[in-house]
Amino acid sequence: MVDEDFTAEAAVLDAGDPLAAMRDRFLSPQGNDLVAYFDGNSLGRPTADVPQRLAEFTERLWGDRLIRSWDEQWLDWPARVGDRLGALVLGAAPGQTVVADSTTVLLYKLSRAAVDAQAAHGRTEIVLDTDNFPTDRYVLEGIAAERGLTLRWIEADPTTGVTLEQVREAVGPETALAVFSHVAYRSGFLADGPGITAAVHDAGGLILWDLCHSGGSVPVALDEWGADLAVGCTYKYLNGGPGSPALAYVATRHHGHLRQPIWGWIGRKDAFEMGPGYDPADGIRSFISGTPPILAMVPLEASLDLVEEVGIEAIRAKSVALTEFVIRLADQLLVPLGVEVASPRDAATRGGHVTLRRKGFREITAALWAQGVIPDYRDPDGLRIGVSPLSTSFAEVAVGMFALRDAVVDHDTAQ
Ligand SMILES: *Cc1c(COP(=O)(O)O)cnc(C)c1O
């Protein structure tokens, strides 16, 4: 197929896309140098109403109501926004999700709570994989060092991910906690959520799912899976903005006995009594530590309004169509140039991005950024095409992939 055929096909796909109108609900770049944005899986775009919503927040809730807003509504925001996330993207009934801190900090708090509870049963191992996101590996290394636990590493295939069979082999009577990403940040591999959860439970372990790369692009069913714990960030497919607070899910059956290690005043029973000694608040609130980042929840809620309008299933359907299109373009335009598709080809085991591999992608990515085509680069040799379903068109994908092909050719010519 030549470029014109792909361009024509993109036009047909855009015309038939039930989510096409959502693109206009995102802020148009003012500098207008943007040609194709392929990094919505790292930092989502702001919705068009974010400037106005932030202005209203500043003027009314902050400027007018001042400290009164804490009592009037802000103290409820972590759990209220958490419940929205639970209902819209996590498959979690109310009262189990909060928005607070960062993913790294929540991962620490929840993992520590889990291993401490499991210590009572003599369980001393944390199961994790070599290809998980760095912060996950580091935080768990830190917890193992702090609590004298053993890390049991699963060697994950970097072009696929952690399989159910590998998990079954790794877990056992020593397993305290297993931590995996639902969608692998490198390959985009979509792990078997319900299967792996059941396998960890069969061994008596607890499971924590990192949902950073699935929240807002792949449906998650935490309650249905019987998951224990989950964390995730809200600035990727959930478009919450740089540094927007993370989410934490703790299944109701664990409330009251799982104890997180950062005993801050906001997570205490009757926080405003400011009394002596720490006594955890009831329910999910005890997983909060200090003052929640309220301001940073405003753009997130704007994005959740869009998710609510269309539903996560429609988002996933578009995501699959986008990644299929990326792979077809890659096969035709890039594979002949020595590029390898390093993501699963079966949509059932693929999340919302496609990773391509080839020598020179680090330099090629820099050249593309200079032209307004924005993928990202991950060692070794990986270029990620992250196609955020609500804000990406098929035409944008085609144009960006043509630019990538041209950049590869230019790179080789210059060598
Ligand atoms: C993006 C990402 C994180 C980020 O953690 P922060 O604390 O927000 O920096 C963690 N885990 C995974 C799997 C991610 O993709």
Image: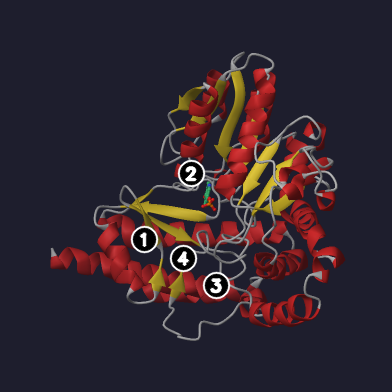
Q: Residue at x 56, y 64 (%)?
A: 388
Label drawn at residue 38: 4
Among the 4 quarters of the image, the one containing residue 413: bottom left
Residue at numbered disc 1: 332
Q: CA distance from mark 4 to mark 2?
A: 23 Å
Q: CA distance from mark 3 to mark 2?
A: 32 Å
Instruction: Choose the circle earlier in sequence order: 1 or 3.
Output: 1
Q: The residue under label 1 is which amino acid type?
A: Gln
Mark in front: 4 vs 3? 4
Q: CA distance from mark 1 to mark 3?
A: 19 Å
Residue at numbered disc 2: 135
Q: The residue under label 4 is which amino acid type?
A: Phe
Residue at numbered disc 3: 393
Among the 4 quarters of the image, the one containing residue 375: bottom left
Q: Residue at x 28, y 70 (%)?
A: 367
Give the image location of residue 318, x and y in percent: 62, 62
Instruction: Choose the circle earlier in sequence order: 2 or 1.
Output: 2
Q: Vertically, is 288 above or below 157?
A: below
Q: CA distance from mark 4 to mark 1?
A: 19 Å
Give the image location of residue 345, x and y in percent: 48, 47
With 264 as the anchor, is 359 left or right in this view? Answer: left
